[in-house]
Amino acid sequence: MEINITTFSQGETEELGTRFSSVLVPGDVVAMFGDLGAGKTAFVRGVIRGFGLDTYVSSPTFSIVNEYSCPDCRVAHFDMYRIGSEEELYGTGFYDYLDGNSVIFIEWSENIPFAIDEEAIRVSIEKGEGDIRNIRIESPREIRF
């Protein structure tokens, strides 16, 4: 299943993430694709808000992973920009989160194609002019939000 949506501001991108949170369950892996500044973290910020947590959400660029304990689930937000091998990925603790208890978001998924299962939901964000973002959500299961 594929959904294509255009947002016209960072706030709309976050709101889409908030709506998207309603279809996620622990065990879901969301592979995110998009250039630097595309809005991946803004989208995740909306998801975290949708899960009922009002906190600061930042890109895990330097920490590799930020973990959020939401009221009904745990969210692991990874940034794989600097990861280039399975050995490096293993060192991040990534595989420990694949226990079915977390919703996992992976920015820069294109850097670890060997670790992205075909059951992963794929979110691609493409920058348009100004604050316009073209967002494609591809899921192996039917999702509606």
Image: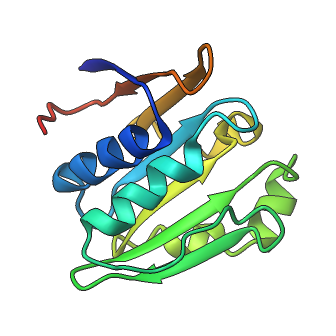
Up-down: is 98 above or below 86? below
Residue toward you, 129 or 72: 129
Q: Which percent across, then down, holds residue 61?
A: 78, 61
Up-down: is 7 above or below 106? above
Q: Which percent across, then down, holds residue 116?
A: 56, 42
Q: Which percent across, then down, holds residue 75?
A: 43, 72
Q: In the picture, residue 49 is in which quadrant?
A: bottom left
Residue at 13% of width from left, 39% of height from top?
145
Q: Is residue 45 left or right of residue 140?
A: right
How many numbered badges does the structure rendering display?
0
Residue at 43% of width from left, 26% of height from top?
8
Q: Is residue 52 left or right of residue 62?
A: left
Residue toward you, 12 or 31: 12
Q: Is residue 39 left or right of residue 14?
A: right
Q: Which percent across, then down, holds residue 54?
A: 37, 79
Up-down: is 45 above or below 6? below
Residue at 64% of width from left, 33% of height from top?
38
